Image: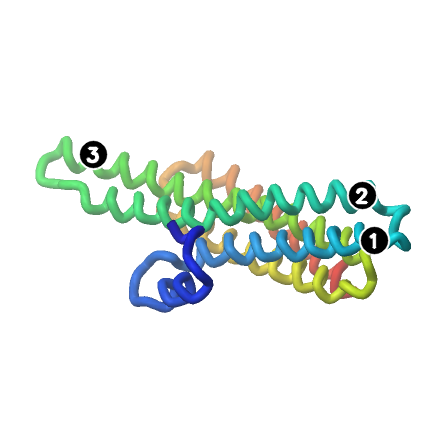
Amino acid sequence: MFENDTLKQFTDKTAAPDAVPGGGSVSALAGALAAALSAMVAGLTLSKEAFAAVAPQMETLRRDAADLQSKLLAAVDRDSESYQAVLAAFRLPKGTQNEIQSRKAAVREAFKGACRVPLQVAEMAGQVADLAVQAARDGNRDLITDACVSALLARAAGLGALMNVRVNLAAIKDDDLVVQMDQKIKQIKQDILEKEREILE
């Protein structure tokens, strides 16, 4: 499991000539780091009496950020597993007509899974971006750059994950699902870019 790797082990595995971990897993990790930074800002804001007025908001922010951090870190492995499922489906036998049909169905289902995981990562990254904006606005001003880095990492995580959704979606011959997911992709992207503009301002 990548979750138990050291930073060096994970970056070495990413650099290796192997398909996993790839952009999807790295996007999830960026999201987990973004959430961790927002949690840090909230925690250090709570440690200052000067920010007592926003303590309830910061408690909620820290709790929500910690939850997203955990889920996004788990998604590092889940994304790689979903891609490996696609590779496994392509390796299925195709010698008979029944095998060909079974393989097609397995490939289609595997690609659906490979869309679902990064879509969830993108949705969570959007939530992290919201927390980062709140941390920058209401948190300890000495930590505003940490909140901004959180937002920028959340942007990278979200947009990177959405790219993976799009490329996997192209392999699915299901018009209804494609339309449904395409609408979600557009909305998540718009929300994330709005949060980026807000944090940069």
Q: Is residue 169 visible?
A: no
Can you tell which mark lies on residue 156? none
Quick one: label 2 or label 1, which is nearer the N terminus?
2
Can residue 54 be seen from the camera position used here? yes
Task: State whether residue 159 is above or below residue 175.
Answer: below
Question: CA separation, marks 3 and 2?
Answer: 54 Å
Residue contact between numbered discs 1 and 3, judged by CB atoms under 8 Å: no
* Left or right of residue 32: residue 57: right
Residue 65: x percent and y percent?
Answer: 65, 46
Question: How far across and down, in percent of the image, does residue 34 sit?
Answer: 62, 56
Q: Which of marks 1 and 3 is nearer the N terminus?
A: 3
Amino acid type, label 1: Asp
Q: Nearer the viewer, mark 3 or mark 2?
A: 2
Marks 2/1 in contact by CB < 8 Å: the verdict is yes
Q: How many marks?
A: 3
> Which residue is at 9% across, 40% downward?
95
Residues packed near mark 1 inside 10 Å, few (<14), some (14 to 19) or many (20 plus) = some
Disc assigned to residue 57 = 2
Q: Which mark is residue 138?
A: 1
Q: Which mark is residue 101?
A: 3
Q: What element carries label 2?
A: helix
